[in-house]
């Protein structure tokens, strides 16, 4: 019997080279897994059923590679993609690892660093487009401060805006079919990051010269680090037409950036996220920006990758069950019912509606006394997730 939770290309499940290629180093301990080459990682992802692979420039090509080495690596990587059928939907630039970026890249106080960051990003965009990427993600890993004595935040935003305007113009000039997706994070590795939430990014995008080219790449862990509801931020991005990409993982609220397997911590939050993405018809990549536990060998890494995709598909099925559950839908219908026809006075303003609303005899006590049955609704959700309905 076929496994109904087996990933298929239409699910668009992707992983970064940096995710399955993570060697288990952390601030308190060295590597626990030997590095694998990008070609090996492509074959690993093909083995577990992924659709695509994403990368930072230096995940694929070392920062100090010669032009000849660069061409050889890219050729071998392209051959692996062709052999496995994997695609590259997204690429990005590492502007945070090298010591040159210790005070940021686009927002650095040093104009030479800002210029180098633009050079590095243009070259990385060239590489991403060469391998088929249609989305280009910007995560400002070092764009921030530990002390506000060091930088004027208005100047920092001005520098970020100038960089993105420059790179949008570069993409247009080169004829690249690219969308930019900005990724927010509240802190780590900097003490405080600029544009620290998805909402902040959405506001910033409207100040750019080409806002139509720029959207967001929200990440579960980054919003949960700040104790925020990730679903609400994704919904805001979707409503604005700016959900260009998404990073799926899991995270205990308020902790450091844990990047756990999708659904490993907050199953109900993961469920409502999957339900939202499927209900609205999001058709982009489901990208897992997560890492296997440090306890694992590469067989464990494969289990981690399979687990991310399998959990998504299980929750997708649970969402379909939730949507079809008669009792759940009856509660929703009841709480949304327009029993007295006052809905006709809502929506777009008119003088007539305003007069009707001002004259309508609302029973405030009855409004406050009405029970909404949300306890039952939430319990039914839990029972769907626990498999007892």
Image: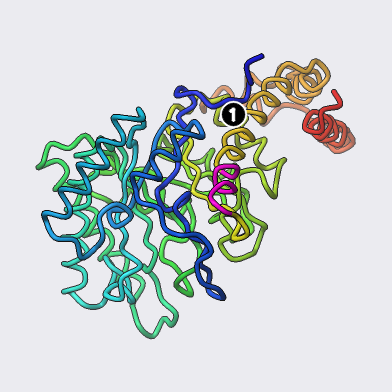
Q: Is residue 257 left or right of residue 142?
A: right
Q: Which residue is at the front of the view, 312 or 233?
A: 312
| Residue 61 % position (x, y) | 25, 55
| Residue 133 % position (x, y) | 28, 38
> Is residue 247 among what the camera can see?
yes
* Up/down of 26 relative to 266, above or below: below
Q: Is residue 53 left or right of residue 11?
A: left
* Up/down of 106 relative to 326, above or below: below
The magenta region covers 297-304
The quarter of the image holding the N terminus is top right
Quarter holding residue 233: top right
* Up/down of 69 relative to 191, above or below: above
Q: Which residue is at the front of the view, 175 or 342?
A: 175
Residue pointed to by mark 1: 354
| Residue 38 % position (x, y) | 34, 48
Q: Which residue is at the front of the view, 253 or 75?
A: 75
Quarter holding residue 151: bottom left
> Is residue 366 among what the camera can see?
no
Residue at image position (17%, 46%) is 126
How is the model colour-coded?
rainbow
Q: Which residue is at the front of the view, 312 or 141?
A: 312
Q: Residues within 10 Å of mark 1 (few under 14, many from 20)?
A: few
Quick check: is 368 in the magenta stretch?
A: no
Q: Main secondary structure of the magenta part?
A: helix
Residue at image position (45%, 24%) is 9
The quarter of the image holding the C terminus is top right
Residue at image position (52%, 41%) is 234
| Residue 161 % position (x, y) | 26, 58
Q: Is residue 314 left or right of residue 301?
A: right
């Amino acid at each position: 019997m076929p496994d109904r939770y087996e990933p298929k290309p239409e699910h668009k499940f992707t992983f970064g080279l940096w995710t399955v290629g993570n060697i288990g180093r952390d601030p308190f301990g060295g590597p626990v897994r030997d590095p694998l080459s990008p070609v090996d990682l492509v074959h690993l992802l093909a083995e577990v059923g992924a659709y695509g692979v994403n990368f930072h420039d230096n995940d694929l090509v070392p920062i100090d590679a010669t032009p000849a080495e660069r061409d050889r690596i890219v050729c071998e990587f392209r051959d692996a993609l062709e052999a496995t059928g994997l695609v590259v939907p997204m690429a990005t630039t590492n502007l945070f690892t090298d010591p040159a970026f210790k005070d940021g890249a686009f927002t650095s106080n040093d104009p030479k660093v800002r210029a180098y960051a633009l050079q590095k990003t243009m070259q990385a965009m060239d590489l991403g487009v060469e391998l088929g990427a249609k989305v280009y993600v910007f995560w400002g890993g070092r764009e921030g401060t530990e002390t506000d004595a060091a930088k004027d935040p208005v100047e920092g935003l001005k520098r970020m805006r100038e960089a993105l305007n420059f790179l949008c113009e570069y993409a247009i000039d080169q004829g690249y079919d690219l969308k930019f997706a900005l990724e927010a994070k509240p802190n780590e590795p900097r003490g405080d990051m600029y544009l620290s939430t998805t909402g902040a990014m959405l506001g910033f995008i409207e100040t750019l010269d080409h806002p139509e080219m720029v959207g967001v790449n929200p990440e579960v862990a980054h919003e949960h680090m700040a104790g925020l509801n990730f679903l609400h931020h994704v919904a805001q991005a979707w409503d604005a037409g700016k959900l260009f990409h998404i990073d799926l993982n899991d995270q205990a609220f308020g902790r450091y950036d844990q990047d756990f397997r999708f659904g490993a911590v907050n199953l109900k939050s993961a469920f409502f996220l999957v339900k939202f993405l499927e209900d609205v018809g999001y058709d982009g990549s489901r990208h897992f920006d997560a890492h296997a536990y440090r306890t694992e060998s590469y067989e464990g890494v494969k289990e981690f990758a399979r687990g991310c995709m399998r959990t998504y598909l299980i929750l997708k099925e649970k969402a379909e069950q939730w949507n079809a559950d008669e009792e759940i839908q009856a509660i929703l219908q009841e709480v949304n019912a327009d029993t007295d026809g006052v809905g006709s006075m809502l929506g777009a303003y008119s003088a007539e509606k305003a007069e009707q609303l001002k004259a309508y005899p609302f029973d405030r006590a009855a409004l406050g006394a009405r029970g909404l049955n949300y306890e039952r609704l939430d319990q039914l959700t839990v029972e769907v997730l626990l498999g007892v309905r």
